[in-house]
Image (spheres, helix red, strand yellow):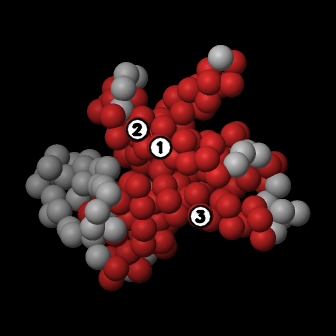
Amino acid sequence: MNLESGQIALIRKPTSRFMLSDPAHLIAQGFGSGLSPIMPGTAGTLLAWLAFATLSARWPAVFTPLNWALIIAAGFVAGVWACSKTGRDLGVADHGSMVWDEIIAFWLVLLLVTPAGFLTQLWAFVVFRFFDMVKPPPIGYFDRHFKGGFGVMWDDLMAAFYTLLVFALWRVI
């Protein structure tokens, strides 16, 4: 079915040519990480981790916690647009190749657990991927009922929230 009009839609295969055909596709598909043939969401989350660590270490005066928060907020808004357009163009509202939602959500997790060593960041990665894949309530509800770019972005923010909740409880115990 077409994403908005109820007509039959052509489902396109995401390729590098498709990704490079529009800035929205490039963003939504995580600059190519979403084209991974194996676990694209995990590939996008790994890209997020690498980018966060590299940018924060290389330019700490620029990538401050406040600037990261602004980047994440702007990235969420851009993601709603990019994922909405890319989903329409692919013919699937929440296609697996769209990983910008994982990138923004994991940046939020890293922002709020940092400063943290490698092992803590690794656990954050594992816990976030768990919640993103399993989608416990209410994440699964949001995934099923919130459509379009907002829905794509929102359920991953909920996975980030659950991850941060686990870390908060872990620190208290």
Q: Amino acid at mark 1?
A: Val
- Judge by depth and name the residue closer to the eye, 163 or 145: 163
Q: What's the distance in space between the residues labelled 2 and 3, CA to CA? A: 19 Å
Three-letter code, disc 2: Phe
Left-right relation of 74 to 133? right
Instruction: Residue at 39% x, 80% y: name it.
Output: 21
Viewer-nearest of discs 3 and 1: 1
Which amino acid lies under the numbered mark 3 shown in the image of this protein?
Leu
Q: Secondary structure at mark 1?
A: helix
Left of 141 or right of it: where is 58? right
Q: Position of residue 155 (x, y in %)?
A: 43, 37
Above or below, comparing residue 74 to residue 20 in the picture: above
> What label sits on residue 130 in the rendered view?
2
Q: Residue at label 1? A: 126
Would you name the residue on which mark 3 appears? 50
For residue 106, above or below residue 112: below
- Measure the C-alpha gap from mark 3 to mark 1: 15 Å
Alpha-carbon neighbours of circle 1 within 10 Å: few (<14), some, or many (≥20)? some
Q: Decide: marks 2, 1 in contact (CB < 8 A)?
A: yes
Residue 155 visible, this angle: no
Indicate the secondary structure of the residue bearing disc 3. helix
